[in-house]
Every structure is written in C-alpha cells, then in structure tokens.
Amino acid sequence: MRKLWIGAIALLLSVSFLFCAAACSKDPEQPQEETSGIEYGTAQPGDALSWEEKPVAVPEYDKIDSMLFENGQSDYSIVVAEGAAANTYTAASELNYFVSLASGVTFSVRAAEDVTWSADAKYISVGENIISQAAGVTVPDTLNSHGFAVRTVGKSLFLQGVTSTGDIFAVYDLLSKVLGYDYYAADELAIATASSLACPDFNYTDEPDIEYRSSQIGYQNGTVSTRYRVVSAQFMSPEGASTWHNSLQYIPYNVYGTAYPEWFATDLKGLCLTAHGYTEKYEKLVDTVAGKMEVVLEKNPNGDTIAFTHMDVGTWCTCEHCTALKNKYGTDSASMIIFMNDVVEQVEQWRKANQPGRDNIRYLFFAYTATVQAPVKEEGGKIVPIDDAVKFHDKLGVIYAPISSDFFHGKNEPQNSSYLKQMQEWNALAGENMYYWFYQSYFYNYFLFYNNFDSMQDNYRAAVDNGAVWMYDQSQYNNAASTGFQMLKVYLSSKLMWDVNADVTALTQNFFDRYFKAASQTMYDLFTAIRLNYLWMSESQGVSGWIGTRVNTSEYFKLNTLLEWEQLIEQAYEDIAPLQISDAALYEKVHDRINLESLSVRYLLIDLYGTQLYTTQELYEQKVQFKQDCAALNITRLSEGELVTVLWSQWGI
C-alpha cells in the first residue's frame, strides 16, 4: 500500500467553505504537493468496529388520542375504493410494507364500500372513496397532478392525491413524517423501529415544484423510480417509434420519399416542415402527422403527452422557404412552431369530437440544436412572439434542451446568461407548457466524473422560475450501473425536483452516512477532493462545463492527485474492514459501493499513467481486475453509444 499524506484543507473543511474560498481566490491553484496532514492506519477484519449507524428516530409530530398500532397490534384498517386505480392499491401496499418493516404490523385492507364512516372509526383511507367523501375530505384543485392532502378527521387518517399517483406520494410523505422514512437506493432506505405509533393530527397539502420528474439513469425503473418520487408524464408515440428524435419515424423516407420528396430536408437528415413551399404537399404532411397522432391517442388511452421532435442532428432544411422563414424570425424554430400549430389544431379538433374527456393532452417539440432559439422580440419591456404565426397553440409545449450549456455552473451564473435568457424567452411563448431537458454526464465516456453537483439546485430553481412542469436531467440512462457518484446525483435530483429549496448540504451528508456507513467520512473526503479538482479545472484552467469537453488528459488529472484519491479509496476499504466479522452481508454491500466509485479513479490511473505506474504484467492485471469489477458491478457501457467491450478491445484484454 502506498503511504501518502492528504492535505488537511481538502479533508477537514466543509464543502461550502471550500468552494466559497476557491471561487473567491484571484489565483486558485490545484493542491498537488504532499502536505502535513493525516496518515492512514491499517484496520484489520478482526479489529473492533468503532462506527455504529445512528438509528432512525421517530420524528416529533402532533398526535391525537388514538394509536395506529400498539405493541404489535392495530385496530386500524386501510380503506380503498373497490375498483380503485392500480396506483391507489400500490399506495396501500407500500404503506403496509413499510409499516411492517418498522413494526411488524400489517393493517387489514378493506373496500370502502364495505365499511361505514363515523368520527370514532379507525381507518387509514387511501385515495378518494365514499369514506373520504363522507368525512368531507377534498384535495385543492390548485395542486398539480402529483399533489396530495393528508388529513386527520375524527380518529381516521386520509391520504388522498389529486391523482392516484398522488396517493402514493401521500403515503411516502406520511411515512417520512411519522417514521423518518427516506429512500437512498434499491438496497438502502431509512425507517424507524417502533412497537407503538400514535395516529398523527395532520391537515396539510404538498406538491412537487416540478410536476413531472423523469428518471435519469438505467438503474431507475418501476418501483425504484416511484420510491424516489420520480414519475414522468405519460409520453406516447407511434408503434415502433422512439419517444425522442422521432420525426423521421413518423415520416420515414423509405415509405414517403418517392411520392413526397418535398417532405424531406435538403440533406435528408430530417423533415422539411414547409414542404419546400408547396401548399398542397404541406397540407398533406400536416394531415399525415396529425393522423398518426390520432392513432396514437386511440391506442394509448392513459397517455397525456405526444412529442414530435427532430432528429439528433444540428442541421435543418436549407430550402428556399425554410431559409426565408429563418431569415424572417432569426431561428429555425419558427418553421417547427408553425407546423406544430397546424398539426395540433387538427388533432385537437379530432380529439374534441372523439375523446372530449382528454383535455390534458399536450403536444411537444424540441428547442434543441438548430431550434434552441425562440422567435421572440421585446415589446414594452415584455417578451412576445415576433408575430401571431409563432404564437403557441394553447396545447403546444416545448422541450428546452440546451445541450451546449455549461452544467458545471448554474443558469444564474455568467457562463450561462444566454441560456437563462433563452429559458425566459421560451417560457414567454409556452407559458405553463415548459418542459426542461438538462444534462449531467460526459456522454462520450461514462467513467468520468461530471461535476454538476454545485449547479443542480440553481438550474432546477431557474427552471421552476421559468415555468417548468417536467424535468429530465439526463445522465447514463442506458448504463445498468454508474460510477462518478451517480447514485448521489439520483438521490439529490429526486429531492430537488420535488423541492428546489431543499438543504443540499444536509441531504448530501445524510446520503454519505447512510450509503457508505463506516466509510462515510472518507468517501465524503474523496467526493470533496474530486470536486475541488474540477473547480480548479474550471476556475484556473478555463475548462468548460459543456458535456462534450474532453477532460480525460494528464493536463487536468495529475498523477499525485489521482494517487491521493486512490489512497482515500484504500482507506475507505480499511474503514469497513471490521464489518467482515460483525456483518458480512453489510460489508459486501458497502464494499461494492466503494468499488463502484473507485472505477472512475482507477480508469484514469490506467488510461493516463498505466505504463508509468506498472510493469507490463502489472498493467495487464490491473486492466483484467477492472474488467472483472465492471462485470460484477453491472457496468455495461463505455459511453452513450458504445458497450464497455469497446474499452476491453482498446486495452487489449
């Protein structure tokens, strides 16, 4: 084991102090020299474990004179409407599951139609039903679709969402307030142990700041996503088509190219949304897209959102008519808005005649690459459409995806002033139909740490200030597991999309304590050290936070720095070594978590300094061990477009 000294400043000061100090420095420097600090010890498996996990306490809350359960027994029943939505039954099931974890108690579940309401009845009513109606429980119609109310009436407790999804979130919120419940990962949650629990005296409502919140990484799906309280809008698309970048899937060239060549862009990489100026062919294009959307609505009775979005390219049609529109409005987005207005108008006429109850449908396009700029002007100090042709249909929305933005920094910082202006401009056009697509990974290399930890809250606040109803903060969506503290990102993002003013510092420390256990402080030190290096890269070296910036070079990751990080990882393993004796299963779980975070450091050491650090045989063994760890930890991809097997080929293994 290499013995290295870690500078005390990087390890002992709080993150907030460090970042303030570094940001204010006129000449920030990357700490590289070995300084007087902490020398790490060598704990062994048989050593006494000084660390003990702090038990989850039952929170303080207002109570009534009735016990939800006492000494393992309960007089309460969960009440659900007969034939309730699947989500409502899920909410009831989740309530029983977590209460059972905390106490061993399982409530009976009864149909609301089979019981009678009275002030002395002991029910936990989930979702709207005849019991909640009899008790006079309502949910304000001012809340968004994921909002809910939690109310105590008589001796009964009512958990009711605006929708059945809100029913689930009402349950999770109740659990957090009476049993200290929190969810960190599929294999890590917090909940108090309680043999008895008084019925709370509650009367409150809540809703997420961002109504729809989409999962970021491949790890999040199904129950995991729901427990993070991350549930997206219900997007619809034609059979066989993608949700995103789907315009050529709506109108494939091999189907329509011969009969309607005017429907396609000059470079054939997308559609020509003016049909090269031919009115009849334009109308036919509108009819065709609208017709396909009508079929989508028929086949997806529970969907609420249709996205018709251009392909993942930076080009646009340059025909005479598209060019004329761009010259008139200053942006290619004008042709998309005009086209979508016509499509939406036609689909909405059909919907009103055939599905009048689905007034919640929204239709979206991308403000992305060629269309990122809005066609607006300032008039009387207000942002307005350039003319009525680009005024949004009231069911039309936009997905603003500023892929060239610097996500190291918030939208309120100087580096992103132009993007904040774009957000304000699109919000002026789209109003309540603003959807945001942000980015938080280097998509060319998934092994690299991406430092948006210090900008996440500011970016989410900016989105909420500018009308956000949906957020997708894209990360390694197609990777089964991710390094670079991605699990912390998932946790923080889920919290901040619900409450953009949540205490990030407290959430971060809480996550490290629960997730890394005895290695919490050491892993927090590693996390801090890596962020400090990225701060140095940004403030001193001028490295952009654009997701395409190539940073995996020795210029930005010095050997001594990487070796210090490696030593912190070794120390983290030492921190948990005694668990091998006291709790072998917990040891394996935390060991894997540390190992997962080690991959980003080990990758850089091998890739940048492998031939300098190791003999040929040692380097080969390091690569093979890295490969084996990736397999064990379920790492499947090198980048967005490449399987991890590409790396093995590059490394000759």
Image (cartoon, rainbow, N blue to C red):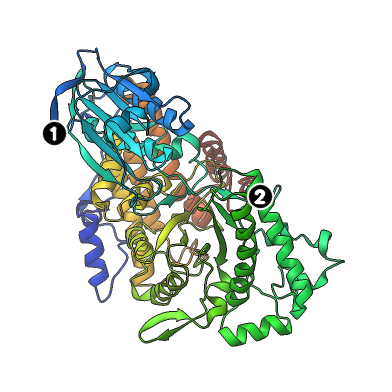
Q: Position of residue 644 (x, y in %)?
A: 60, 46
**Which quarter of the picture shows residue 81?**
top left
Q: Position of residue 580 (x, y in %)?
A: 34, 23
* Residue drawn at the location 25% of the way across and 25% of the way down: 47
Q: Helix or strand or loop: what does disc 1 sit on?
A: loop
Count how many numbered circles sit on residues in the image. Answer: 2
Q: Helix or strand or loop: what does disc 2 sit on?
A: helix
Q: According to the image, label 1 marks what residue?
A: 62
Label number found at residue 465: none
- How far is mark 1 from mark 2, CA to CA? 49 Å
| Residue in front for this viewpoint, 146 or 603 | 146
In the rendered image, which quarter contains the C terminus?
top right
Residue 378 visible in this rendered orientation of the protein = yes
Front: mark 1 or 2? 2
Q: Position of residue 602 (x, y in %)?
A: 46, 48
The answer to which of marks 1 and 2 sits earlier in the sequence is 1
| Residue in front for this viewpoint, 128 or 649 | 128
* Residue drawn at the location 66% of the way across and 44% of the way down: 299
Q: Residue furthest right?
A: 258
Q: Which kind of residue does numbered mark 1 sit on?
A: Asp
Q: Position of residue 557 (x, y in %)?
A: 42, 60
**Which quarter of the picture shows residue 585?**
top left
Does residue 555 appear left or right of residue 503 in this picture? right
Does residue 25 appear left or right of residue 412 in this picture? left
Q: Which kind of residue does numbered mark 2 sit on?
A: Val
Q: Residues within 10 Å of mark 2 (few under 14, many from 20)?
A: some
Q: According to the image, label 2 marks what residue?
A: 296
In the rendered image, which quarter contains the N terminus?
top left
Q: Residues within 10 Å of mark 1 (few under 14, many from 20)?
A: few
Does residue 561 appear left or right of residue 645 in this picture? left
Does residue 294 appear left or right of residue 67 in this picture? right
Residue 574 visible in this rendered orientation of the protein = no
